[in-house]
Amino acid sequence: MGNHYIHTTILFTLFVLLCLTVFGGYASLAQDEAEQEYIAEVRPGDENEKFPINVGVVVIDIDSIDGAQQSFVANFAVVTEWNDPRLVEDIEYYRVMDTDDVWTPNLQILNQQKLFTTFRDEVTVLPNGNVYFTQRYWGTLSYPMNLKDFPLDEHSLKIKLVAVGKDSDNITFNINPERTDMSEILTVTDWEIRSWDAYTEEIEIGPKLPTFPGVVFEFEAKRLVKFYLIKVLLPLMLIVLMSLVVLFIDPNHTGPKLSIAITAILTLIAYRFLLGNLLPKISYLTHMDYFIFGSMFLVFAVLVETSIVARYMSQKREQEANNLDYWSRWVFVIAFLLVTFGSFIL
């Protein structure tokens, strides 16, 4: 009886172990098959159809716009959304997954110079298979600017996003207006953001390189001229007017006339070097350059006129000196108005 009980126990134990092994093998096989069914490198949807991706761009702040460096510093977030039927599950909660574990569009900021990301590389997956990926960027982006109208210039600056990789040809982007916006209060102080727009287009990533589907966030920026009017143009005008005062001094005082004329031109040269840190370093001339060069020419011309008057006085030709001063007053005042008008209005 005891041996029969022992044999029965052993057989029952072996049967249980066999069942556990079989069921464990099936479970492991099912898990392996489930894992093999989802391949993160393979795009969801029909491979013969364009796969839609909704994109939203939210510009949180524009820190600065640097015309001399042809760049701007932006703080913005990009929200992408798509549906992956392979991730549908009958659950009541969303999942957070690493971007390495799911398929994601390979979005690149085309005109980035140095950008930092602040969010983790994770996606949020809803039970219905909708996938959301949000990333915040902060840093410098480049964009070419035409500064010929400086400091009265305005520019269209762009943030360009492109999808690169083997799936880029089968992707189509749609702008999500509910997740696209720009803050009304921005940090940039010397520019006014007048308008913005977001749209999709095919973007060429470089000369003789293929185009890729992309998203563009574009905003219009106009330089505020008050800074340059108060701190650059007004002092410069005063220096020019100081030199014109020489024309109203009696020719008998040639010493003070020459002293003021020389002081004015030296002051203007020193001021021009000081402006070097404020003005853009470009190869072509801007409105500001025309005004500065015109002012320097006028101040130098006053110095030449004063030297001629001094020579007349040394030769006892006082009437000719007085006549030269008289006509020079009108000529130089009119010339100064023409330089100002021609530099900034024409």
Image (cartoon, rainbow, N blue to C red):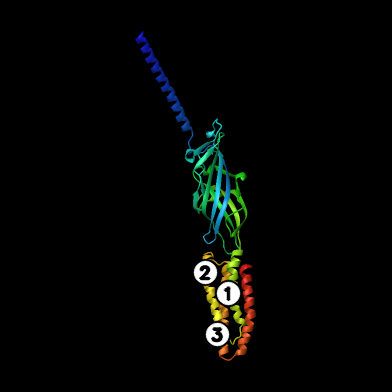
> What is the distance, in whole Å, between disc 1 and disc 2 at their CAs?
14 Å
The residue at which mark 2 appears reads as 274
Which numbered circle lies on residue 254? none
Which sits in the foreground, 301 or 182? 182
Outermost left residue: 3
Looking at this view, is 303 or 10 the one in front?
10
What is the spatial separation of the Cα atoms under label 3 and label 2, in whole angstroms? 29 Å
Q: Residues within 10 Å of mark 1 (few under 14, many from 20)?
A: many
Q: Looking at the picture, which amino acid does disc 1 mark?
A: Ile
The residue carrying pointer 2 sits among few (fewer than 14), some (14 to 19) or many (20 or more) residues within 10 Å by Cα, namely: few
The residue at which mark 1 appears reads as 239
Residue drawn at the location 57% of the way across and 71% of the way down: 292
Q: Do callouts 1 and 2 mark residues in contact (Cβ within 8 Å)?
A: no
Do labels 3 and 1 touch, CB within 8 Å?
no
Q: Secondary structure at mark 3?
A: helix
Q: Please report whichever mark, 1 or 2, sits nearer to the chain's N-terminal start.
A: 1
Q: Position of residue 195 (x, y in %)?
A: 63, 54
Please report the residue visible at 52 percent of the width from the left and 72 percent of the height from the top: 270
Residue furthest out toward the bottom: 316
* Residue type, numbered disc 2: Leu
Give residue 283's position: percent from left, percent from top. Answer: 52, 66
Judging from the image, what secondary structure is the residue with disc 1 in?
Answer: helix
Q: Amino acid at mark 3?
A: Gly
Label whose residue precedes the other's in the sequence (3 or 1): 1
Query: Mark 3 or mark 2, which has the lower sequence index?
Result: 3
Q: Which residue is mark 3?
A: 255
- Relative height, residue 211 to residue 252 (above, below): above
Image location of residue 173, percent across then percent down: 57, 44
